[in-house]
Image (cartoon, rainbow, N blue to C red):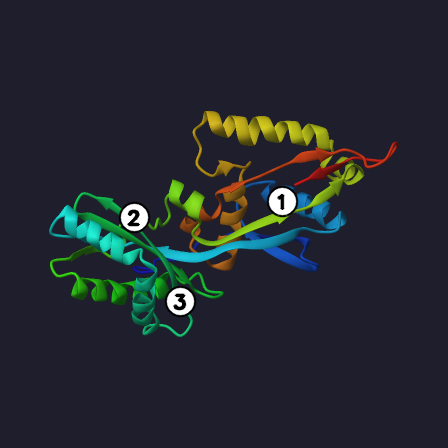
Amino acid sequence: CENVIGYVPLPVGTVGPYLVDGKEYYVPMATTEGALVASTHRGARAITMAGGAHTELIGDGMTRAPALALPSLEAAAELKRWLEAPEAIAELQDAFSSTSRFGRLMGVKVGLAGKYAHVRFKCFTGDAMGMNMVSKGVNVVTQRIIDKFPGTELLGLSGNMCTDKKPSAINWIDGRGKSVAAEAVIPASIVASVLKTTPAAIGRLNMHKNFIGSALAGSIGGQNAHSSNILTAVYLACGQDPAQNVESSTCLTLMEEIPASEPGGESSLYV
């Protein structure tokens, strides 16, 4: 922060224990919104009582997409064909790796608008969010491209096809950063005692709210109740950039009742 004139205190609460992949976590949340920590804690309690959540990392790659100007559409198309060819990755990876011991260039996708090319580089950054790491590496890669294709001009290191801190279809479809899926199965008795409802009622509301309502709103990645609320509170508590919640909180929430496996048994809520 520059031109500092003071600090803003934020209350920080904790959610937990939250059982995920066999390990208990306590999650800090910084917020001034009443009931947010309490309601999140209630959901974590129900999941933990039911045996916890299981997660899978299904995508991993931070992106940066510089905007380039070329002499003509023909030149831009030639650049696109070369960048998206498998043999180009090895050459570009060599340039990218010269800037980092941890970063690795994984792939390239090029969008054309006439003679202008937006080149979306996808990079592995280890455990780091890695935006600075990726930007540094892509800057060197871009210079390699300019040297190889005379007449190419770098308009900006970020040309918004990344896309950073803005809702977008490309992030929703291809992902940006780490894409994670999680599931939990909560017995009806726990749903009743902790959440004060039934699996059938939650499943019905989820369909009409998170799917039909979001569809009527034309939402991109908004098939959830309020994930950005929770994620922003976690980011603030952990000192992360809260603006990143725009792409980080896009998610789809499935909730449906699983019928009892035997007569007289209880149903469950699949999340």
Say if residue 128 shows up in the picture. Answer: yes
Tell me if mark 1 has few (under 14), some (14-19) or many (20+) residues whose alpha carbon lies within 10 angstroms of its own. some
Q: Residue at x 21, y 65 (%)?
A: 143
Kindly identify which residue carries mark 2.
Answer: 160
Q: Residue 261: x and y, percent?
A: 82, 37
- Secondary structure beneath disc 3? strand
Above/below status of 261 relative to 49: above
Kindly identify which residue carries mark 1.
Answer: 40
Tell me if mark 3 has few (under 14), some (14-19) or many (20+) residues whose alpha carbon lies within 10 angstroms of its own. many
- Secondary structure beneath disc 1? helix
Say if residue 11 shows up in the picture. Answer: no
Q: CA distance from mark 1 to mark 2?
A: 33 Å
Q: What amino acid is labelled 3 in the image?
A: Arg
Q: CA distance from mark 3 to mark 2?
A: 21 Å
Q: Residue furthest right?
A: 264
- Secondary structure beneath disc 2? loop
Which is nearer the N-term, disc 3 or disc 2? Answer: 3
Kindly identify which residue carries mark 3.
Answer: 104
Which is nearer the N-term, disc 1 or disc 2? Answer: 1
Tell me: 125 left or right of 44: left
Q: CA distance from mark 3 to mark 1?
A: 36 Å
Q: What amino acid is labelled 1 in the image?
A: Thr
Which is nearer the N-term, disc 3 or disc 1? Answer: 1
Q: Residue at x 35, y 72 (%)?
A: 97
